[in-house]
Amino acid sequence: MESALISKLQAGEEQAFKELVESYQDKVINTCHGFLHNREDAEDAAQDVFIEVYRSIGTFREEARLTSWIYRIAVSKSLDALRRNKRKKRLAFFRNMLTPDNQEVNHAQSMEASPQENLEQEERVRVLKQAVDALPENQRVAITLHKYEGFSYSDIAEIMGTSLSAVESLIHRAKKNLQKKLFRYYGRNL
Amino acid sequence: MKKKKTALEKEVEKTLQSFDRLQPLAHNPYFYTRLKARLEEERQRKAGWRPLLVLRPVLVVLLALVNVYTAFLIWGNGNDTLPYRDAYVSAFVSEYALEQNIEDPFAINEQD
């Protein structure tokens, strides 16, 4: 099934590319969103991912699964976009101080909860995202793929090109670091 | 003190649980159309550069020819340019009165 799709893609069949985009689009956008926390940026990064897939499918060897290959590109493009955003933010420091933050904060709103509870939850999500962003890159990638996208440890190992035990260790350390950062944050702000 | 620690632990726990409450983004039905437009745009931009890519070897050959011609002018018939050079140097020397301070060209001429 997968190798038939790969052959069609390598032959340049447009219908096959459309099928590929339609089946992976949501997961790729959500993966990018896990890193970038902004829908527009996530969609731009996802476009970069599919353009890279379109260009490089000819060199793809079936040693890895197509899925892992696509997510590996998604992680790399998201990290590139994050670096670009950081550079832009540094340049636009004063402008950002004058305009409100446009990051999406309604990610975890619930229809049943009261506005007060929703506000508290939004604040928790914001704090959590900040803490995740402050993790070392490998830990951030592992925890984002696991917690935001629900990838299994073995999937993450394949995407990151590392061993299962390394992923277990990365996620364990990421959780410990997150706890430390959150304790420190709430210790100052509670 | 203990109360604060318990409150802290509770808040940290609640914050970590926010991972499980994150909702996936809604499907964007226009994503493929936008992607196609961007691919097409990139294809056209690349096609715009193609004539220049074809001309690149021609430009390299032209540059090499100019270099060879310049080298020929400099070293090819150097003897012919010698009389002109001497005349030019003596005109330059007399124009700036360099022969008066030929031993120390930077010395101040006291007569001036």
Image (cartoon, coloured by chain):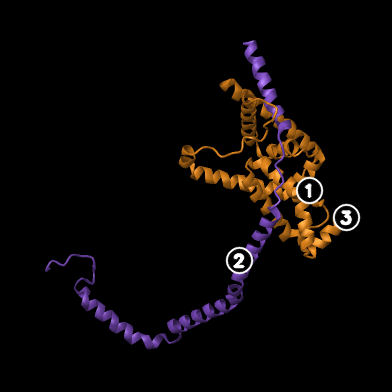
Chain colours: A orange, B purple
The amino acid type found where label 1 is placed reads Ser
Q: CA distance from mark 2 to mark 3?
A: 35 Å
Q: Which residue is mark 3?
A: A1
Provide the chain ID for the residue under circle 1: A
The correct choice, above or below, for A170 with respect to B52 in the image is above
* Residue placed furthest toward the left: B111
Provide the chain ID for the residue under circle 3: A
**Is A159 on the left or on the right of A38, as rendered?**
right
The amino acid type found where label 3 is placed reads Met
**Is A50 on the left or on the right of B61, as rendered?**
right
Mark 1, Cα crowd under 10 Å, few <14 / some 14-19 / many 20+, is some
Provide the chain ID for the residue under circle 2: B
**Is B83 on the left or on the right of B11, as rendered?**
left
Mark 3, Cα crowd under 10 Å, few <14 / some 14-19 / many 20+, is few
Residue A143 lies in quadrant = top right
Residue A104 picture location, percent across and down: 61, 38
Q: Secondary structure at mark 1?
A: helix
- For the residues beneath circles 2 and 3, the answer to whether they share a chain is no
Image mark for residue A68: 1
Residue A37 picture location, percent across and down: 64, 40
- For the residues beneath circles 3 and 1, the answer to whether they share a chain is yes
Q: Which residue is mark 2?
A: B45
> If you read the primary sequence from the N terminus, does the residue marked by circle 3 or circle 1 appear first?
3
